[in-house]
């Protein structure tokens, strides 16, 4: 799955979103493998800064608006939604992941680290 299949160019470049700070333009055509994480893997995820576990961060610091959004997403859960992580840090999809966590559902994701792994393994290097 390519990033341009998940997001518009405007969404990718929206500097108010963490995603824009993690996606170089040449990664837009990279064909990511979609993976699935379970509840125990969700518990190991970090915030995009890497300074807190996502579940603890949302449990301890979520605003009422964020809680409402998570509950709304849980009530209308989309099992096909794909979130973006980077080597264990959530880049996009915090609220979807928390909705899945509430429901004990799996989450589909792509890992930005796959781009760097492929580059490191490339025979041209």
Image (cartoon, rainbow, N blue to C red):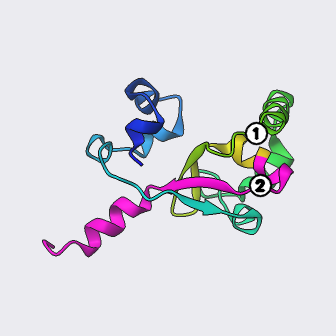
In the visual, does 114 lie left or right of 47? Answer: left
Residue 81 in picture, x, y percent from top left: 61, 42
Vertical side of 88 occupied by 30: above or below: above
In front of the other: 34 or 62: 34
* Quadrant assignment, res 70: top right
Could you tell which of marks 1 and 2 lies nearer the N-terminus?
1
Vertical side of 117 occupied by 95: above or below: above
Residue 37 in picture, x, y percent from top left: 65, 62
Residue 114 in picture, x, y percent from top left: 40, 63
Residue 82 in picture, x, y percent from top left: 57, 46
In the visual, does 45 lie left or right of 84? Answer: right
* Quadrant assignment, res 9: top left
Image mark for residue 77: 1
User: How far apart in space, not on screen, are marks 1 and 2 (Cα)?
Assistant: 9 Å
How packed mark 2 is, by other alpha carbons closer than 10 Å (few <14, some 14-19, many 20 or more), is: some
Judge whether residue 49 can be spotted in this image. Answer: no
Vertical side of 115 occupied by 11: above or below: above
The residue labelled by disc 2 is 105
Q: Which residues are magenta?
A: 100-125
């Amino acid at each position: 799955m390519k990033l341009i299949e998940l997001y518009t160019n405007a969404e990718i470049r929206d500097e108010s979103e963490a995603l824009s700070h993690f996606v170089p333009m040449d990664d837009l055509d990279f064909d990511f493998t979609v993976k699935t994480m379970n509840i125990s893997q969700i518990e190991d995820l970090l915030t995009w800064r890497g300074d807190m576990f996502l579940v603890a961060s949302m449990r301890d610091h979520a605003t009422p608006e964020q809680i409402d959004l998570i509950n709304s997403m849980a009530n209308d859960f989309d099992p096909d939604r794909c979130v973006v992580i980077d080597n264990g840090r959530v880049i996009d999809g915090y609220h979807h992941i928390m909705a899945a966590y509430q429901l004990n559902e799996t989450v589909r994701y792509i890992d930005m680290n796959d781009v760097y792994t492929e580059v490191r393994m490339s025979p041209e290097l």
